[in-house]
Amino acid sequence: MLTSEQFIQMRRDLHQIPELALQETQTQQYLLKVIAQFSQTFLQVRTIPELPTAILVRVKGSKPSKTIGYRADIDGLPVKEDTGLPFASRHEGKMHACGHDIHMTVALGILNYYSEHQPQDNLVFFFQPAEESQNGGKLAYEQGVFSGQWRPDEFFALHVTPDLPAGTIGCRNGTLFAGAAEVNIDLFGQDGHAAYPHRANDMVVASAALVEQIETIISRSIDPIECGVVTIGKIQAGTIRNAIAGHARLEGTIRGLTQPMIEQIERRLREVTEGIGQSFQAKTEIEINQGGYWPVVNDPAITAEFIAYMQNTPEVAYQETQPAMTGEDFGYLLAKIPGTMFWLGVQDQAQLHSATFSPQEAAIRPGIEAMIGFFNQHMSQVKGEK
């Protein structure tokens, strides 16, 4: 197995070449080059014409009873890096500000081990493009990528967090991440002169009323012991101070810990928007796009076994975590294939998606070793024993 220093160098190489969703060609080339240097005895590498920057690697098991999937997302963010690191991004305006360079490196470490130590069960590694946008996991699933010998019976993935000590594993049963949907609302009335409001239909006033009504959805339409969020983060209307705006556009997001919760919020949002339209005699258009960003709901049985291993292994630092309202498109895959997502602590003062985010590389080796240890135990379970 490669050394910690070699894995750190891989992470730094990847950190310098962040690419946006579905544009990860250089990243894919680097990953393929590294994987080609591993022992190929048990490996089968596959690329996908329909999703050209993705990589699948199958590791043939010695006595397989199932196929275990492991996903690592590979895209970066449109963030201008401000870390001052000697290995900072070389791609202007792009950065691995969400830690996907760490995600890829941990996956390479696990794959490197199993390329030299044949697993009992089959493994499928999915280096996934377009997590930050374009929902690459959903695209892959809908294109039939996970079929035949490439379909996992279970799926695992991690996400780094600056809020846990470096190398700490964090997890919980049930919902780990919320689902997320984008919301766009357009209100159409009649523009006019500020001196003659009776001859116009003011969409600034209508949008203000709509925002006020949207704020009642969570407080009055959702069970208070459950959790959801509706945020309108952007409003555009008008061009000049003394003219009445005939059009307003609101943009925001919905977050919920379960898919039924998100769907309930969506229904109320449509109803409230329609009601404001009738009240203000305005035409309304609403677009809600969730894509693959479903809640990340961990499988009860698989996750219970995962947590038990992490809690009972002295070499692993484990903490149970609370649900987070951040979105992740691994949720779509977990809605189709049971599995577990977990946190890997990379302790940092800067938060995810920040221009100064600098995860501690000391987390890489513990993340690799924790998953190898878990997989080895998981694969040794007698079928049906769990």
Image: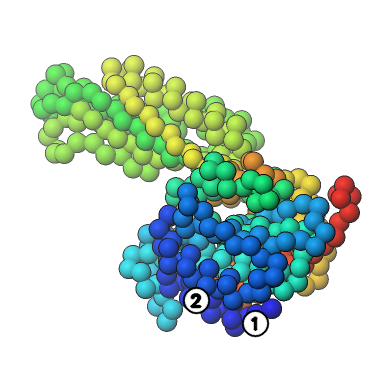
279 lies above or below 169: above
Question: Where does the N terminus fall, quadrant-wise?
Answer: bottom right
**Could you say which quadrant of the image residue 157 lies in?**
bottom right
Residue ID for mark 1: 3
* Lateral position of residue 182 relative to residue 70, left or right: left
147 lies above or below 282: below
Label 2 Cα crowd, 10 Å radius (few <14 / some 14-19 / many 20+): many
To which quarter of the image does residue 43 belong? Answer: bottom right
Q: Amino acid at mark 1?
A: Thr
Instruction: Look at mark 2 in the image and give the residue it sits on.
Output: 12
Q: Nearer the viewer, residue 359 or 219?
A: 359
Nearer to us in this view, 265 or 204: 265
Please identify the quarter of the rendering in which residue 365 is found.
bottom right
Tell me the element at label 2: helix
Query: How far from the left and from the top, in percent, is residue 267?
Result: 50, 25
In the image, residue 188 sits, relative to residue 87, either above or below, namely above
The answer to whether residue 370 is visible is no
Residue 313: image x %, image y %?
Answer: 81, 67
SS for dot 1: loop
Residue shown at 61% from the left, 37% from the top: 258
With 139 as the anchor, is 108 left or right in this view? Answer: right
Q: Residue at x 37, y 64 (%)?
A: 94
Residue 301 in the image: state x and y as whole percent. Answer: 79, 47
The type of residue carrying mark 2 is Arg
Which is more N-terminal, label 1 or label 2?
Answer: 1
Who's the residue at 59% across and 83% down the image? 5
